Image (cartoon, rainbow, N blue to C red):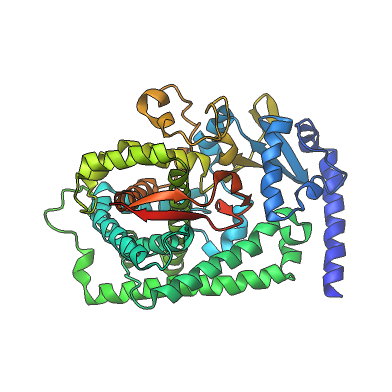
Amino acid sequence: MVLIVLFVASILVLVICHIYFRYTRRGRLFAQLPGPTRWPLIGNIGNFNLSQEKLFSYLRTLPTTYGDIVGVGAFHVTSIHIYHPDDIEFILSSPKFNSKQAPYNFLHRWLGEGLLVSNGNKWQHRRKLLTQAFHFNILKKYSQTFMEDTEELLQNIEKHPNKEDWDIVELIAKNSLRTICKTAMGTSMNEDVESIAEKYFSAIKKISSALVPRLCSIVLFFELTYKFSRNYKQEIEAIKDLHCFTDNIIRERKAYLEENPDILNIEENDDTPNRKGRLAMLDLLIQNQKEGFIDDEGIREEVDTFMFRGFDTTSVTLIHLIMSLANEAKVQNKVYEEMKNIFGSSQRPATMDDMKEMKYLECCIKEALRLYPSVHYIARNIPEETVLGGYTIPSSTICQIHIYDLHRRPDLYPDPERFIPERFLPENSVDRHPFAFIPFSAGPRNCIGQKFAMLKMKSLTSGLIRKYRFEPVTKVSELKFYANFVLKTTHPIYARIIPRK
């Protein structure tokens, strides 16, 4: 009975909001935007009330049907989807549009106000603090861990019972999670790593399947009615497991630092002007807590954020890179030849200097990021009336930037569906629009961990390709994606791995 009363009350409020919106300047401006037919009151709810797989496919039709700016909305909520690099540059480059609202507010119970979702002064403070954790000196220190984890992955593949039909996702995801824990968090995950990883992956899947449907359901979108849903209970259960995982990491590291306080003291011969320039991420956060700049909740927010964004996005790119190399034998051979030129016949792990020489492999990684950006869309809030692409966008509009579609524009990338790493050779990139390639976002809120991610991907791929040859099992034409926080396929991706002689 209570649910019915709340639902009816919500509908009445929405009707009033809709009537008010329709006859205001916001409503009139929004009505001029191209887009699918907006029905009275419910707007485009019907267009988006789809399964996650169908929603991903439907979103791909918007730019080809309506153009570079598409307006969709429901009730008083206005949203635009943009695809042109000029418009994307305008939004991402301006501090006016730094704020994130929906759909990031759905993540607050899990990530709090971590760097991904925070705004204003809090975001500026956290950004400044965390940027220190990705200083060049820190990345040099991480390179040893990258080498160790690559060797460990190679050993795990050797033990794998069936190399002929290898599920790429599982081993790489676990390896990426372990790397994040050992580098940024300073914990080894040596105890029962398999079950810990499985529990974390399960919780990530559970919270994703709870939250993503909120984008396309009127009942789930609004907090008042969402809290009575099955999805809400599922979200809370997942958050308990996710917070338990990160709380254990923080607790373990704090205990270790209590026993080894000298770790927080920078070496006297450190030539970094900032005395914290050699501290890993979690150590840096703990040190700042001691100095009163962040509390326990703030530490967990940032650890939760980096664990999620760090391991999942990197593993997704690596998975698609290996699949692409398996399907493109000539490209794979070029990468192997580059490795032979760098390493000769040695199987030694890659150093930082080695990775600087991996020019063609870097092109391959970038091409994988172009075709399969792990973060396939981002959003910003437009707080005031703004002229964009010849239209006046009303204030308080959500701006959705679809990186997946931007990266497949034929005017930016001829034959865009093909995997062609040469696109990213210097001579072929010089005249490209600066916002034509944004796998790590761009502007003031770009990803602070992008160099970390590139080094991890180079280290792992170089180790794999020197020891194994990839052959296709999953074909590119078989890939089907579904709407999620990161780019996910409906079915596992497989490759055949053959030891090199």
Which residue appears at 60% of the width and 74% of the height? 237
Q: Is residue 282 visible?
A: no
In the rendered image, residue 77, in percent from the top left (x then y), is placed at 74, 47
Left or right of 140: which side holds 310?
right
Q: Considering depth in this image, is 96 or 258 the residue closer to the camera?
A: 258
Quarter of the image for the N terminus: give it.
bottom right
The answer to whether residue 336 of the structure is visible from this angle is yes
Q: Residue at x 56, y 35 (%)?
A: 417
**Can you give x and y, in whole percent of width and height, for residue 435 in the image?**
49, 31
**x then y, percent, for residue 41:** 86, 47
Foreground of the two, 357 or 297: 357
Which residue is located at x 46 percent, y 29 percent?
Answer: 434
Q: Is residue 216 above or below residue 70?
A: below
In the displayed orientation, state which residue is furthest to the front: 501
Left or right position of 290 against 44: left
The quadrant where residue 39 appears:
top right
| Nearer the observer, 351 or 218 | 351
Residue 102 sits above or below residue 195 on the image: above
Total labels drawn: 0
Quarter assignment of residue 405: top right
342 and 180: which is toward the camera: 342
Q: Quadrant of residue 226?
A: bottom right
Q: Residue at (83%, 67%) from the top-left corner?
A: 6
Q: Position of residue 329 (x, y in %)?
A: 42, 40
